[in-house]
Amino acid sequence: MTSHQAPSDRFADLPPLLPQVPFRAYEPGRSPEEAARDFFGVMDRRRSVRMFSDRPVSRETVEWICRAGGTAPSGAHKQPWRFVCVNDPALKREIRLAAEAEEREFYERRASRRWLEDLAPLGTDPDKPFLETAPWLIIVFALAKTDDGGMVYYREESVGIACGMLISAIHHAGLVTLTHTPSPMKFLAQVLRRPEHERPFLLLPVGYPAPDATVPDLERKPLEEIMVVNRPDPGG
Ligand code: IYR
């Protein structure tokens, strides 16, 4: 079978292969070891920050960040994401009030004791002033269908990867964010008047950290705990 034939003759009328273009490899200009170590150095400085400055961030910055998020791989290249960027103070206030109402429900009723135990060291609570202080909120929506009603594949994986890339782009621009998941998040679709096929996925406030911002003194798992090479010996 040659590469331009469909993998199966079950459907004789499948669309043709896309035109192919040469791949232009990214050259970091140093060895992979150096480039990978440097990138770790940059990523290791990222922290989830809850205390924001109201210092403005240009729309152009947010546009580049969204373009970077939009480079994510996705199932069958369906790109099942929408990045709704909010900088209107009245709209941010509406989102804050609705999110805080959900969060109060969560902290006062819905959350299990175990969950509250796990959150207590992080000091989170139902007050979300950052939803108004941060100059921008990026609300990521996952598309249940493409805009023209087509199928989407691996939606959660695709949008999750795009969020990781958005977060990296925000950090790379010298800005901060945190992954905020008010739950349930349905209110975001209503407040932002999104169409039925868009499902709220994640809320990322974007801005500069407050000058006196603090973060919890957390440790990250060492490499030995997160990386496995090959497999354990049998019976070992
Ligand atoms: N959504 C709530 C609770 C919360 C849950 C987890 I898991 C966190 O890592 C942090 C917070 C809130 O935003 O406060």
Image (cartoon, rainbow, N blue to C red):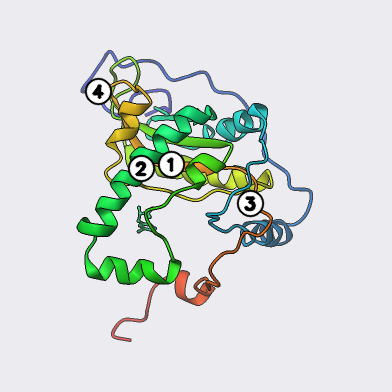
Q: Label 4: which residue? A: 9
- Decide if residue 229 is in sight here: no
- Decide if residue 163 is in sight here: yes
Q: Label 1: which residue? A: 203
Whether tag 2 and tag 4 are in contact, CB under 8 A, the answer is no
Which mark sits nearer the N-terminus, 1 or 2? 2
Q: In 3D space, how far apart are the residues under numbered discs 4 and 3 (Cα atoms)?
A: 57 Å
Q: Label 2: which residue? A: 99
Q: Residue at x 47, y 33 (%)?
A: 92
Whether tag 1 and tag 2 are in contact, CB under 8 A, the answer is yes
Percent x, y for residue 200?
34, 35
> Label 3 crowding class (10 Å Cα cut-off): few <14, some 14-19, many 20+?
many
Looking at the rendered structure, the kind of residue marked 2 is Ala
Mark 2 or 4: the one toward you: 2
User: Callout 4: helix, strand or loop?
Assistant: loop
Q: In 3D space, how far apart are the residues under numbered discs 2 and 4 (Cα atoms)?
A: 51 Å
Mark 3 or 1: the one toward you: 3
Q: Residue furthest right?
A: 29
Percent x, y for residue 168?
58, 47
Image quadrant where residue 46 sits: bottom right
Image quadrant where residue 120 sits: bottom left
> Image height check: is 41 above or below 234?
above
Q: Residue at x 63, y 27 (%)?
A: 59
136 left or right of 149 in image: right
Looking at the rendered structure, the kind of residue marked 3 is Pro
In this view of the protein, which residue sits in the foreground, 25 or 53? 53
Image quadrant where residue 91 sits: top left
Tag shown at residue 209: 3
119 left or right of 210 in image: left
